[in-house]
Image (tube, rainbow, N blue to C red):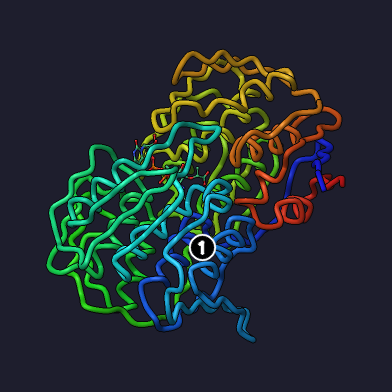
Amino acid sequence: MATRLMVEGGAPLRGEVAVSAAKNAALPALCAALLTSRPVEFENVPALADVTTTRSLLEGLGGVVSTGPDGATRVQVAEVTSNEAPYELVSTMRASVLVLGPLLARTGLAKVALPGGCAIGVRPIDQHLKGFQKLGAEVFIRNGFVEARASRLKGARITTDLVTVTGTENLMMAAALAEGTTVIENAAREPEVSDLARLLSAMGARIDGAGTERIEIQGVPELGGARHRVIPDRIEAGTLLVAGAITGGDVTVTGADARHMSATLSKLEECGAAVTVSGDRIRCQGPPRPRPTDLITSPFPGFPTDMQAQFMAMLGLADGISKITETIFENRFMHAAELARMGARIETDGSTAVVRGLRYYHGAPVMATDLRASASLVLAGLAARGRTEISRVYHLDRGYERLEAKLGSLGATIERLR
Ligand code: EPZ
């Protein structure tokens, strides 16, 4: 059933809201359960469409996923009964590629549908595959599938040509069961990579340097079970704080980790917001009108590409001109055209967007094109005069847990229309 979101703008958002666990940490963590026949328990898996897809993926490979009395999610793949990740699932969620490394390492065979491109870019996985070949796997691409085979992976030195988050995660998981030592150079330093390393270490892996550009993994013959609490979602937290800033409100997120968000928080301050951190609480008091600022997306600890769309929505209301440079994905300005339907003045040219701020957005029917673009349209709708109706909100459900309820608890008028 198609649903749309109706957002009535104009109210400054106020109050406190708790952050959920991170989608981009939960997905690789769930896939890591494939590395062992023992149960792995997760205290706080978020209720997201992508988590449901991952669950189906694991069940299709022989996993049993259940929810304990304490609400923890328990995953056990006592035996891998299939080595194939089907196109139906992979085509709905690129992160399905994260079963490749664990399947290959655990069973010596992985067959995963090639994830095609998506709205934000071509998104090849050549670095993942090159890394598996370095670990001694034979890798074939045929009939739309990647097939990787190895009797036992062997440790190696891998230098990726560019920083890749899921690439680093896939290779780290594969190397955990390889024979000997693997070194990943130019590794991604995202907090989600460190959180995965924390889980793998709890399962018995020997990993050093996660969170830095050089990760060293001493392979072990087998891994055990573990209990894991997934880190908070820095992108959801950032989105909620921008909701406070763009409406001139006063929002506090709880259960967040400011250490994972320094680039986002300092950009909020550059836009004129007052940001206060105390423990796991981050407060953002919005300016009467955002100040213009320039931003360039880059790998962690740089400014996250997953916050670019939300900031574009805010800078569209700034008192001046801002320049946004997107360096990670080649097609991540789809939201600009939709914001323009609300009156925004944004000129995009390749990887650069020039945003001429205006005083007010006007509510309009708009269409979500990807996960973070949909968040930017919700934020613009909250600041707009009148009603905004956002279609294709299934994009939003992939990565935001109960967003309407959370924004509603801060005073937003937002409703899902079926
Ligand atoms: C992860 O995607 C996140 N997804 C993305 O979040 C996030 O935008 C991205 O990292 C960057 O931070 C998950 O963690 C599930 P990359 P990933 O490999 O790993 C190119 C969201 O909104 N590349 O770091 O797929 C690639 O095309 C999503 O939550 C290759 O060329 O991103 C891109 O231009 C969207 N070859 C760049 O590198 C490769 O083998 C970075 O991609 C791998 C990547």
Q: Image quadrant of residue 17?
A: bottom right
Label total for image? 1
Residue 354 percent coordinates (x, y):
52, 15
Q: Give above or below for 199 relative to 369.
A: below
Q: Quadrant of ligand 1?
A: top left
Q: Quick one: SS at disc 1?
A: loop
- Crowding at mark 1 (Cα within 10 Å: few <14, some 14-19, many 20+): some
In the depicted view, which residue is nearer to us: 225 or 1? 1
In screen coordinates, is 332 left or right of 181? right
In screen coordinates, is 229 left or right of 198? right
Q: Give above or below for 158 relative to 388.
A: below
In the depicted view, which residue is nearer to us: 268 or 194? 194
Residue 339 percent coordinates (x, y):
68, 24
Residue corresponding to mark 1:
280
In screen coordinates, is 356 left or right of 125? right
In screen coordinates, is 387 left or right of 287? right
Residue ID at (42%, 64%): 83
Residue 377 percent coordinates (x, y):
69, 34
Residue ID at (48%, 68%): 61
Residue ID at (12%, 68%): 180
The amino acid on which the numbered mark 1 sits, given as a three-letter code, is Asp
Residue 374 percent coordinates (x, y):
66, 38
